[in-house]
Amino acid sequence: MAVAIADGVSSSPGAGAASASAVEAGTRYALEAAADGTGREEVVRAIGAANVAVRNAGGGATTLVIALLDATGRGAIARIGDSSAFILSGGAWREVWLPDSDVGSIRTATSALPAETPAVEVAELELGLGDVLVLVTDGIADPLRDGPTTVAPGLAAALASAPDPLDLALVVDFSRRGVHDDRTLVAVWAIPPETAPGAHLEA
């Protein structure tokens, strides 16, 4: 399974097309690469494929997060920019990467595609039974980090099981002072399989 999110850089004309190109090219490459493995090398190359696609799109810039997982919930994840990923386990949140030192301040720049040498961050993943991998843009990541008694528990309760699309849209449409950025959330649940031990994935 390959999942991705992108957040077009609003100050860059063509950001919407750039983000769409990045997700399409990155996930397509990741799925093709999954035949060889679901590790760090594959997701880094997927970012590279997305970088080429964004450059060829002829304008715009975007952040990108791509995760590649096998059927048991093991794999790798890579990102460029300030979008992020969290694991929800037992009702508690853990961010895949350490948050930026300027979280809580007003940021005006982030790493983005296209780039001559993308500043890719990579991590390995292993989802346990019942865990949820949640990919988010900074419009959700920032309030999730600084809302331990508001946004974080509310999202945890809402994502304990897979909501339908409309309910998910309502969940991310929360109100919080100072939070006005675009919001994108993609989640993968590790759920019990019907006939075998372990876990399988549902997005």
Image (spheres, helix red, strand yellow):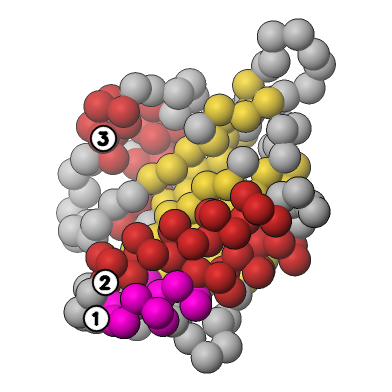
Residue labelled with disc 2? 15
Which stretch is magenta?
Answer: 51-62
Residue labelled with disc 1? 12
Say which element carries label 2. helix
Q: What residue type is labelled 3?
A: Ala
Position of residue 80 relative to residue 171, above or below, is below
- Residue 194 figure quarter: top right
Q: Could you tell me residue 116's position as x and y percent? A: 52, 91
Position of residue 163 relative to residue 173, above or below, is above
Q: Could you tell me residue 125's position as x and y percent? A: 71, 49
Position of residue 36 relative to residue 56, above or below, is above
Tell me what residue is drawn at x 26 percent, y 35 percent: 169
Q: Tell me, yes or no, whether the highlighted magenta stretch contains residue 122.
A: no
Badge 1: residue crowd in 10 Å (few <14, some 14–19, many ≥20): few
Position of residue 8 relative to residue 177, above or below, is below
State left or right for residue 190 relative to residue 113. right
Query: CA–CA distance between discs 1 and 2?
Result: 6 Å
Q: Which amino acid does label 1 sit on?
A: Ser
Mark 1 and mark 2 in contact? Answer it, CB < 8 Å: yes
Q: Nearer the viewer, residue 114 or 137?
A: 114
Q: What residue type is labelled 2?
A: Ala
Q: Quadrant of the N terminus?
A: top right
Tell me what residue is drawn at x 29 percent, y 52 percent: 183
